[in-house]
Image (spheres, rainbow, N blue to C red):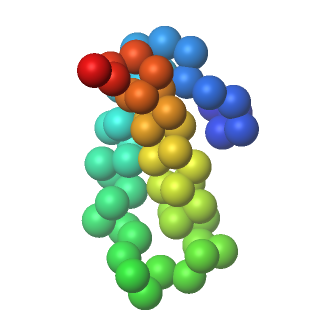
Protein backbone atom coordinates (compact mmCIF):
# COMPACT_ATOMS: atom_id res chain seq x y z
CA UNK A 1 0.00 0.00 0.00
CA UNK A 2 1.18 3.49 -0.80
CA UNK A 3 1.15 5.27 2.55
CA UNK A 4 1.10 8.70 0.94
CA UNK A 5 -2.30 8.12 -0.64
CA UNK A 6 -5.65 7.93 1.05
CA UNK A 7 -7.69 4.89 1.89
CA UNK A 8 -10.03 4.30 -1.02
CA UNK A 9 -12.50 1.77 0.36
CA UNK A 10 -13.72 -0.01 3.46
CA UNK A 11 -11.51 -3.03 2.80
CA UNK A 12 -8.38 -0.87 2.90
CA UNK A 13 -9.75 0.90 5.97
CA UNK A 14 -10.33 -2.41 7.78
CA UNK A 15 -6.83 -3.59 6.89
CA UNK A 16 -5.32 -0.34 8.17
CA UNK A 17 -7.28 -0.52 11.44
CA UNK A 18 -6.06 -4.10 11.96
CA UNK A 19 -2.48 -3.08 11.25
CA UNK A 20 -2.72 -0.17 13.70
CA UNK A 21 -3.92 -2.66 16.33
CA UNK A 22 -0.84 -4.81 15.62
CA UNK A 23 1.53 -1.84 15.84
CA UNK A 24 0.18 -0.29 19.04
CA UNK A 25 1.88 -2.80 21.40
CA UNK A 26 5.18 -2.26 19.56
CA UNK A 27 5.29 1.52 19.99
CA UNK A 28 5.37 3.52 23.21
CA UNK A 29 6.48 6.94 24.44
CA UNK A 30 10.12 5.81 24.36
CA UNK A 31 10.06 4.62 20.75
CA UNK A 32 12.34 6.75 18.57
CA UNK A 33 10.56 8.76 15.86
CA UNK A 34 12.74 7.12 13.20
CA UNK A 35 11.64 3.60 14.20
CA UNK A 36 9.87 1.90 11.25
CA UNK A 37 6.97 0.76 13.45
CA UNK A 38 6.50 4.29 14.80
CA UNK A 39 6.51 5.76 11.30
CA UNK A 40 4.04 3.17 10.00
CA UNK A 41 1.76 3.68 13.01
CA UNK A 42 1.66 7.45 12.54
CA UNK A 43 1.02 7.21 8.81
CA UNK A 44 -1.70 4.58 9.12
CA UNK A 45 -3.33 6.34 12.05
CA UNK A 46 -3.61 9.50 9.98
CA UNK A 47 -5.07 7.60 7.02
CA UNK A 48 -7.59 5.86 9.28
CA UNK A 49 -8.57 9.16 10.89
CA UNK A 50 -9.02 10.84 7.51
CA UNK A 51 -11.15 7.98 6.19
CA UNK A 52 -13.23 7.90 9.37
CA UNK A 53 -13.85 11.63 9.22
CA UNK A 54 -14.89 11.45 5.59
CA UNK A 55 -17.10 8.36 5.80
CA UNK A 56 -18.28 8.05 9.39
CA UNK A 57 -18.63 11.60 10.67
CA UNK A 58 -21.96 12.66 12.12
Residue found farthest to the bottom: 30
Depth order, front residue of 22/58: 58
Give the image location of residue 36, x and y in percent: 60, 64
Taking 13 as reference, is 22 left or right?
Answer: left
Give the image location of residue 19, x and y in percent: 39, 43
Depth order, front residue of 37/5: 5
Residue at 48% in and 55% down:
41
Taking 16 as reference, is 46 left or right?
Answer: right
User: Residue 8 occupies which quadrant of the picture?
Assistant: top right
**Residue 15 in view:** no
**Residue 42 in view:** yes
Depth order, front residue of 6/21: 6
Q: Is residue 2 above or below residue 57?
A: below
Residue at 50% in and 33% down:
50
Depth order, front residue of 48/38: 48
Image quadrant containing the N terminus: top right
Residue at 43% in and 87% down:
30
Q: Is residue 57 above or below residue 16?
A: above
Give the image location of residue 16, x and y in percent: 43, 35
Image quadrant containing the C terminus: top left
Amino acid sequence: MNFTSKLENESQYNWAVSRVDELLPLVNDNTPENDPNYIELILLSNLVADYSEEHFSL
